[in-house]
Amino acid sequence: MAYIKKTQPGAKTRKQHIKELIEAIVIALVLALGIRAFVIQAFKIPSGSMEDTLLIGDHLIVSKFAYGFQVPKPAMIDVYGVRAPFFETSLAPVWGEIKRGDVIVFRFPADRTKDYIKRVAALPGETIEMRGKVIYVNGKVWDERFGVNKGGQFGETVEKNINFGPITVPDGHVFVMGDNRDRSYDSRFWGTVPIREIKGKAFILYWSWDSASNWIRFSRIGGLIR
């Protein structure tokens, strides 16, 4: 005689467990993508263009809502080298205020698949120029403590590292520069950044790895980015 096993009231089948697990994973992924797109995002510093503020191997958190909210729109994005339909965001600066001296992450205008991090040197409508490595904004010396001049990486001299401008920043754009002035590829070379392309403001270091010494830079962890 065939025996039929009865399911106890409230007991879950294997399929139900698998379904709940898949649902939990999907919800977690959606939440993670949402937080990354609209709230905060982690970045790693790959080059020395922002020394000595940011070092190679620094890992930082960027606030996506420091200046407003990120408006999603359909787009093709690169996923491990493969173009796929998804969405990207555009900054709507409805609160906060972009200030000269802020360190921001943005889509590189010449290749929007790449993210750059630089410091805001001039705001919309301002005129900026460099004379003898001294930066002038609206005709006055920019009294800043961030920039360093370490010379060209291979000893070369580039005119735009010494003199450039004057340039008037268009409406809806900012002019950005790296703190390592002689070794930064920035607005002096490729132009201004549309504000809509700003991904957020860098605000804290959560990890730092020194590959030269193969050790952690403990003193940098938790430091605010200014």
Image (cartoon, helix red, strand yellow):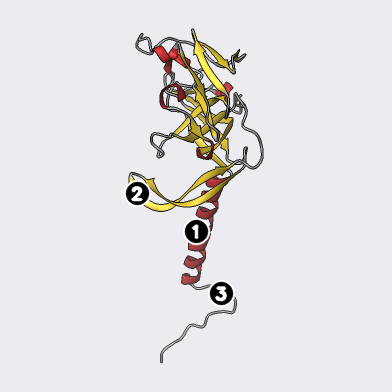
Looking at the picture, which amino acid does disc 1 mark? Answer: Val
Task: Write the residue at 59% across / 76% down.
Answer: 10
- Most extreme residue toward the bottom is 1
Q: Quadrant of residue 65?
A: top right
- Report how many numbered discs are placed on residues in the image: 3
Give the x, y percent position of residue 198.
53, 37
Report which residue position mark 2 lands on: 83
Q: Which mark is residue 11?
A: 3
Mark 2 or mark 1, which is nearer the start of the sequence?
Answer: 1
Would you place residue 55 above or below residue 2 in this image? above
Q: Quadrant of the C terminus?
A: top right
Q: Callout 1: few (<14), some (14-19), or many (20+) C-alpha neighbours within 10 Å?
A: few
Report which residue position mark 1 lands on: 26
Instruction: Say which of marks 2 and 3 sits in front.
Output: 2
**Circle 3 — which element?**
loop
**Circle 1 — which element?**
helix
Task: Write the residue at 46% across / 26% down.
Answer: 57
Looking at the picture, which amino acid does disc 3 mark? Answer: Ala
Would you place residue 131 above or below residue 226 in this image? above
Q: Callout 3: few (<14), some (14-19), or many (20+) C-alpha neighbours within 10 Å?
A: few
- Most extreme residue toward the left is 82
